[in-house]
Image (cartoon, rainbow, N blue to C red):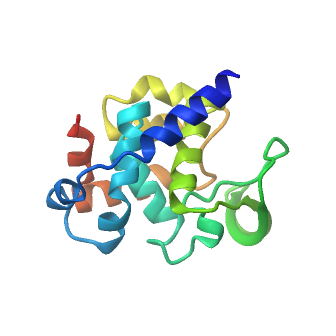
Amino acid sequence: MVWQLLWDTVQSYLTRPVKKERARRMLKPHPFFEQYAEYAIQSMLETGIPASITLAQAALESDWGKSAPGHNFFGIKAGRSWKGPTQVLGTWEVVHGKKVRVKAKFRKYDSPLDSFVDHAKIIVNGPLRHAMGHVQSARDFVTALQSGKKKYATDPAYVSKIMRIVDEYGLEELDEVND
């Protein structure tokens, strides 16, 4: 019941319009950000997850939108609890310090918005929720996502890759949006 309430709240909030022009003015121009910044901002306003990190993760995980089969912009795998549609895809994982190619089952979404909503839900409600105590800065938040027993990504360079995108494109400006 609580999970359904949160899901409904996040989904309804993320469908509210955010002024795209405002987001576009804040960013170093890139078509990916112009297209998806509003979802990251709306997610932040509802959950507190820094928009800069959400957008940088989506860019990195989807190769700037070029590789997001099934609208999965965050590389979210389909575990046992996932009841929605899935797809088997090849991916790179770091296992015992070595980068290896594997096939894995990933979640499949009806739209990019559904992917952004699920990303927020996973962080807020799942084993990564400890990161929610570190939303004061983008760097602290993404570092927290990679700390502890459960990590967002297997790549040991994940924090630096995300922060390189955040810094290069000035995405932390998005974290200051409050309306």
Q: Residue furthest bottom?
A: 66
Residue 21 location in percent, x, y? Answer: 18, 59
Classify 101 as above or below 45. Answer: below
Classify 102 as above or below 40. Answer: below
Image position of 171 (left or right of 112):
left
Image position of 128 (left or right of 105):
left
Q: How many marks?
A: 0
Residue 157 visible in the current orientation: no
Residue 16 location in percent, x, y? Answer: 37, 45
> In terms of depth relative to the viewer, which is nearer, 50 or 14?
14
**Quarter of the image holding residue 105?**
bottom right
Residue 40 location in percent, x, y? Answer: 39, 49
> In terms of depth relative to the viewer, which is nearer, 9 or 25?
9
Name the residue rendered at 46%, 55% in the picture: 57
Q: Residue furthest left?
A: 25
Name the residue rendered at 50%, 36% in the picture: 10
> In terms of depth relative to the viewer, which is nearer, 70 or 89?
70
Name the residue rendered at 17%, 54% in the picture: 22
Residue 172 location in percent, x, y? Answer: 25, 46
Quadrant location, the N terminus:
top right
Name the residue rendered at 23%, 52% in the picture: 19
Q: Residue furthest right?
A: 80
Quadrant location, the C terminus:
top left
> In terms of depth relative to the viewer, which is nearer, 3 or 31?
3
Residue 81 visible in the current orientation: yes
